[in-house]
């Protein structure tokens, strides 16, 4: 699905784009476009005809109509925080980057319907803050939330740390507004909790990484803000014990388990060594840790319940030690241990990364098998597994041996991926739990997807974007 | 999208079907097929080439391949409890009814992953019971659950009484197995909470009413069974007060609001008059009632919390009176008042029905406007509104004037629908909140759907069922 724009057109096209969105919003100089053409880790860099920044849905539609007419490929981009290269153009210089950052209005906050209507370019943090100011919760939460946009979050069906209670990004959406490949607009901004009048188009655009349409706005679900939150760091022996603790917590916690994060001891070692101001809140060391958070709309009894839960888990031999945060500061300190892991890996050298998921019950076996396989292949490399155990989602990162040559180590990325992904697939898992496919994993799809499923995906792509102009070369 | 099967084929086709599934499972005699060709209310009756009952996914695939080869249209059918005629063939006698009732295995119950893999023909009640026996909850719950099947529930994205807490049927599914229009099988029975490897096909087949593929099995989510449940019947003055109570309950209840059902006083009048053994649990009468149910995984404190909630609501003037069920029998008695409403309407004569939803905040205005409009049109007719207020879903039923001619009254069905649906659409609502489109509302779609959305639906139908053989004439 490649496109070759009419070679006479670029100059005329830029003029027409400028007429649609204003000359200031058609960026062509390297200085202006640089931040749109590379991503934060420098893994992907591209070229573009221009970066266009429409200021309204109608302007997005006009730009897409023009691209449809001229056969110009479009790469939609939000906050440019994607980790799989989905938001970066290729290196032909023929693609147009369409930035949604000027679509930055929160169109409506409807407390009684518990909805918020946001345009695509609103950052996740702004959406969270707007909900919180109104005494509500928008629960999507992830590391890049200050920069990532709602549009990007939905295009990639973002995950994060509260999926266990509130679901993935797709589960937080009631309605969508989408500009289609031919520039028509699907105005689906519904606020309905129930609507069985035809096919669910919403879930087709969410997670399609801009290959089926460009999301310009969404009706998001709001939740009552919890009135009590308790957070514990728990030391334990094994992922199997952690899984048993999860079951016990869900049965006994007296609130909703809103986070259940697993990390190996080495994660804590790296954080304590490299992140200033962190300290180990437990006296001894343990092979594994769980960061447990429970929220309720009750009150003071939640503290007692989590203490009872931990006492029962201790008595059953599921856990070795635990601390419950006694203050908001202490809670922030526990979360800092978890959230600093990626940063703490960097001073240790290169890391080969995997964003995988398996059925919950398979997590212990996956971790054991993947660790053993990596030890066979690269005995001195250091697995640094952590992730959202409650979702079966493990970031199985492997840091280079101390002192090894980083480039030579990272050159084995695909070999190690193949090894780990084979174990994932044997357990019925996913090789991209929350980051998507983009360019990074596109080549892997034929190896892991049922051909029938790939055919279905291609049939849908052809039906919705017959000319292949929306984010070509991504996903499919 | 009509089909005309090769007229030489029927006899040969029946032989080939018999070879695929066994002669006993190809039903042709009127005695054998009658129960598949009409639905419970007698609104729809059709004819069929045969009713075929495959016993496995492979047999379903073989039947569909044969139909694909011979241009035979297929009407998939589960428990035959649908309310919009989606499961009934047309009257040409050219369509084949494919019953999923023999796909009745619960393939797996995986407690640690909190999943249950069910074939399409398992009844909802059996699925609920299997979960309950394992100490888990499968929360989908609706009146026809003893007969309705999982396949039908998913094909229609069923709703019911716990949607406010657990979502619609589509929200309870992790994976699907689907036989496609050409007889290939999409084996998508994943157990993953997170999987971002391509388009979400699952949500396309769920709610498509068998027009895009035939669901043969699903991986369903299980939940921890609540350890405490409190149920209250509450008398109040208005839907607006009920909505304010909902907000208060979600903020204060100390558990999850699992049901929030609204009913007008006339519902209770009908039930008390016609359903033996029912009694009004409140001393006075009130214009409106709410049946509130709150569940938690805590313990005894839930009772105190719901009493505190009701005391606060009383003090704020939101409610007039309330009773909390003191026993399981009392709880069943309260639910019986709600669930008997449709049965209690029958002795009062014909009812013109609407299954609609609006944004939560619009429910009071919708009810006021629809009631006034009906009073203008038919002053003596009696609106009997009830429904799932927590989902914005109202069953706005209108019972005939006492003593009026039932047939003459029901002849005004479409006129009244048009009136009520126009109000629904003005509030951004849905004319089919939970029952689907089927044949009943197919003709209404062009009037209520954005043409862009209808075009998208048609494009997807063409992509997945190019010959239009799957449940033709339904939905689109």
Image (cartoon, coloured by chain):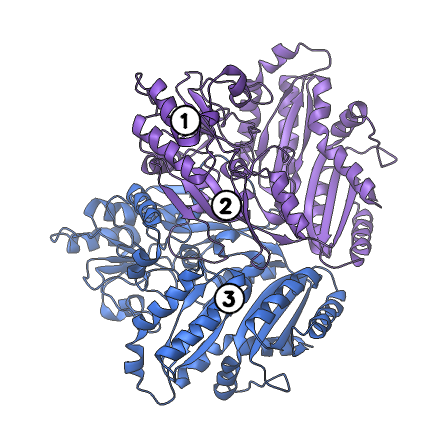
Chain colours: A blue, B purple
Identify the secondary structure beneath mark 1. Answer: helix
| Chain letter, disc 2 residue | B
Residues A71 and B162: in front is B162
Query: Crowdedness of circle 2 by 10 Å Cα count: few (<14), some, many (20+)?
Result: many
Determine the chain carrying the residue at label 1.
B
**Position of B292 compared to A128: left or right?**
right
First reached walking from the N terminus: tag 2 or tag 1: 1
Task: Evaluate whether label 2 is on the same chain as label 1.
Answer: yes
Tell me the mark number nearer the camera, choosing from 2 and 1: 1
Residue B465 x, y percent position in the rendering: 34, 34
Res. A275 in view: no
Residue of label 1: B18
Q: CA distance from mark 2 to mark 3?
A: 22 Å
The mark lying in front, picked from 1 and 3, is 1
Q: Nearer the viewer, residue A289 or B110?
A: B110
Asked whether disc 1 touches disc 3, contact meaning CB atoms under 8 Å apart, the reply is: no
Identity of the residue drawn at 59% across and 73% down: A290
Percent x, y of residue A228:
69, 65
Dividing the image into 4 quarters, which one contains the C terminus of chain A? Answer: bottom left
> Residue under mark 3: which chain is it in?
A
- Secondary element at tag 3: helix
Q: Do tag 2 and tag 1 residues touch (Cβ < 8 Å)? A: no
**Category of crowding for the residue at label 3, using alpha-carbon neighbours closer than 10 angstroms: few (below 14), some (14–19), many (at least 20):** many
Residue A363's disc is: 3
For disc 2, the marked residue is: B218
The Cα atoms of the two marked residues, 1 and 3, are separated by 45 Å
Q: CA distance from mark 2 to mark 1?
A: 27 Å
In the image, are marks 2 and 3 on the same chain? no
Do tags 1 and 3 sit on the same chain?
Answer: no
Residue B167's disc is none
> Which residue shows up at 34% across the image and 30% down it?
B66
């Amino acid at each position: 699905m490649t496109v070759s724009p009419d070679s006479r057109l670029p100059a005329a096209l830029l003029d027409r784009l400028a007429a649609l969105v204003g000359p200031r919003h058609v960026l062509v100089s390297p200085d202006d476009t640089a931040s749109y053409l590379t991503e934060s880790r420098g893994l992907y860099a591209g070229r573009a005809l221009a970066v266009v920044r429409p200021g309204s849905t109608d302007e997005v539609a006009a730009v897409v109509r023009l691209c449809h007419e001229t056969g110009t490929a479009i790469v939609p981009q939000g906050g440019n925080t994607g980790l799989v290269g989905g938001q970066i153009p290729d290196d032909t210089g023929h693609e147009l980057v369409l930035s949604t950052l000027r679509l930055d209005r929160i169109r409506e906050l409807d407390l009684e319907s518990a909805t918020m209507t946001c345009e695509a370019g609103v950052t996740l943090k702004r959406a969270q803050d707007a909900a919180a100011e109104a005494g509500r919760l928008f629960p999507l939460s992830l590391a890049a939330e200050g920069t990532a946009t709602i549009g990007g979050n939905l295009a990639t069906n973002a995950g994060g740390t509260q999926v266990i209670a509130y679901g993935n990004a797709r589960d937080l959406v009631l309605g969508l507004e989408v500009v289609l490949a031919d520039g028509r607009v699907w105005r689906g901004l519904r606020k309905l909790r129930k609507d069985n009048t035809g096919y669910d188009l919403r879930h087709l655009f969410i997670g399609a990484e801009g290959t089926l349409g460009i999301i310009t706005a969404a009706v998001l679900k709001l939740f009552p803000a919890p009135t009590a939150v308790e957070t514990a760091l728990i030391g334990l022996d094994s992922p199997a014990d952690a899984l048993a603790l999860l079951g016990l917590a869900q049965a006994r916690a007296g609130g909703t388990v809103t986070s259940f994060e697993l990390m190996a001891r080495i994660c804590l070692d790296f954080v304590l060594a490299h992140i200033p101001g962190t300290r180990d809140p437990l006296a001894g060391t343990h092979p594994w840790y769980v960061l447990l958070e429970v929220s309720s709309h009750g009150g003071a009894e939640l503290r007692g319940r989590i203490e009872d839960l931990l006492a029962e888990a201790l008595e059953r031999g599921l856990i070795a030690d635990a601390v419950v945060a006694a203050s908001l500061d202490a809670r922030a300190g526990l979360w800092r241990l978890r959230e600093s892991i990626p940063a703490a890996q960097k001073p240790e050298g290169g890391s080969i990364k995997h964003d995988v998921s398996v059925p919950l019950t398979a997590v212990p076996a996956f971790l054991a098998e993947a660790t053993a396989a990596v030890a066979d292949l690269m005995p001195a490399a250091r697995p640094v597994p952590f992730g959202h155990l409650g979702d079966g989602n493990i970031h199985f990162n492997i840091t280079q041996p101390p002192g090894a040559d980083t480039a030579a180590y990272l050159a084995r990325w695909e070999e190690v991926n193949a090894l780990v992904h084979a174990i994932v697939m044997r357990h019925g898992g996913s090789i991209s739990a929350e980051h998507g496919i983009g360019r990074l994993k596109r080549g892997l799809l034929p190896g892991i997807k049922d051909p029938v499923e790939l055919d279905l995906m291609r049939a849908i792509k052809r039906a919705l974007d017959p000319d292949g102009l929306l984010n070509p070369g991504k996903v499919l």
